[in-house]
Structures are given as structure tokens and as C-alpha cells.
Amino acid sequence: MKDNNIKFIPDIIYEDIPFTMLIHLLSKNTTVISDVVYNWRWRETHDSITQSRNAITNFNSRLNALNICWDILKKYDYLKNDDLINAFKTKILNLDLYIFLENVGDNEEDYIYKIQELVYKFLRDWQMLDLKLASSLSIKHQVVYYAVKTGNLNLLKRFTYDKNVIEFKHTLRGKKYSVSIVDNNDPELIKKH
């Protein structure tokens, strides 16, 4: 870190994302250990800046951190490394964007629309709207990103409302798809779609 003058970027949220990426990209040697050396504290009060999942400013900060990572990949000429880029984009779909999408249906209509718009623009700008990488994600993730791509807010709300998803079945060759959802407000508990 000292040799490459790597430091946390001041005055941004999610500064650990570009910091960690830069460390790994510039490392001459990386060792993976199984020891727990980092504890992440989850606050029950939800007053943590980074744990708030329903604030547009936090989401924009997350997108900013990801865009800084893209600039790092570009600066160090990693954009031609398809395996690295695809792995990074898959991580973005599976984690960075999805943590803000997973319960978006619990919010007001304006907020849902704004998040859908921001995610759509991000996917467009990063050339991910074809959703090819999403095929490696869970079916629920795929449905949520399809809803974002098509602007189907009803579908987005339906799959991101605070529900417990019991089961998704997927048969590739036979083309059979089945979705079962536990709806906490439904006396019958299970709806089949």
C-alpha cells in the first residue's frame, strides 16, 4: 500500500470498494487466509449511513464507488480482461445493486421509480442491459432485473416487497418454470404464479 500510495478516498461513502479493488489489482502477492480478521457490525437501530437501504443518496454513493472502480480498471488497463470484468459485473448484479433492490417494494411509488431509473441507467451505461450475466444469478434476481429493464414497476414491487420466497423451480430443457411465494398478509400463505 505504501509503495503504491494507496489510501482510502476521503469524503465518500463505500470507500472500501475502490480501496479493496486497487489493493488487489496492484498487489504482487495475495494470500487468502481462513482466519476472521474483520468484523462487520450490523446496527439494529438502522442509523448507520452504509446500512440504510432506502436512501437515494446512499444508493448514489454506491454507484459512485462502482464508477470509481471502473476508472481504476481503465487506468490500469484491466478492461480487456473479460474474466475479471464479467466477475466484477456479476458481483455488482448479485450484491451492489441488489441490496438496494431487494426490498424496494416496501417504499413509496416515487422512490421505487427513482431506484428503477437509476439501476436502468447504470445497467445501460455499463453495457449490462442485455442481462446476459444475470443468467448466472438466482431466478428471483433475474425477475427483478427484468422488471427494472422493462420498467415494469408492478413486477418489481411484487418481487421486492418484504416477502419470504419459498421456492423457484427452473427446468431448462423442458422450459418449465414455477414460482411459489409466501405472502405474509395472505391467509392461505401460498400463491402460485
Image (cartoon, grey):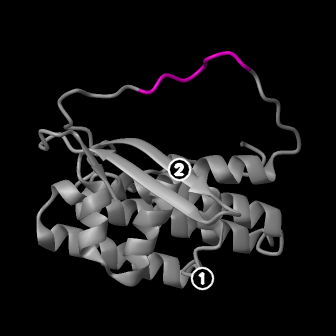
- Circle 2 sits in a helix, a strand or a loop, which is it? strand
Q: Which residue sits at x=30%, y=56%? A: 160
Quarter of the image with the C terminus is bottom left
Q: From what the image shows, is residue 136 above or below residue 163? A: below
Q: Nearer the viewer, residue 29 or 122?
A: 122
Visible residue check, residue 181: yes
Q: Which residue is mark 1?
A: 127
- Circle 1 sits in a helix, a strand or a loop, which is it? loop
- Amino acid on which the number 1 mark rests in the picture: Gln
- Residue 150 in the magenta stretch? The answer is no
Q: Is residue 115 left or right of residue 41?
A: left
From the top left corner, tell me how far across and down residue 147 is, in percent: 38, 73
State the extent of the magenta-drawn residues as a range.
Answer: 34-40
Q: Which residue is mark 2?
A: 169
From the top left corner, tell me how far across and down residue 99 is, in percent: 39, 51
| Predominant SS of the magenta segment | loop
Quarter of the image with the N terminus is top right
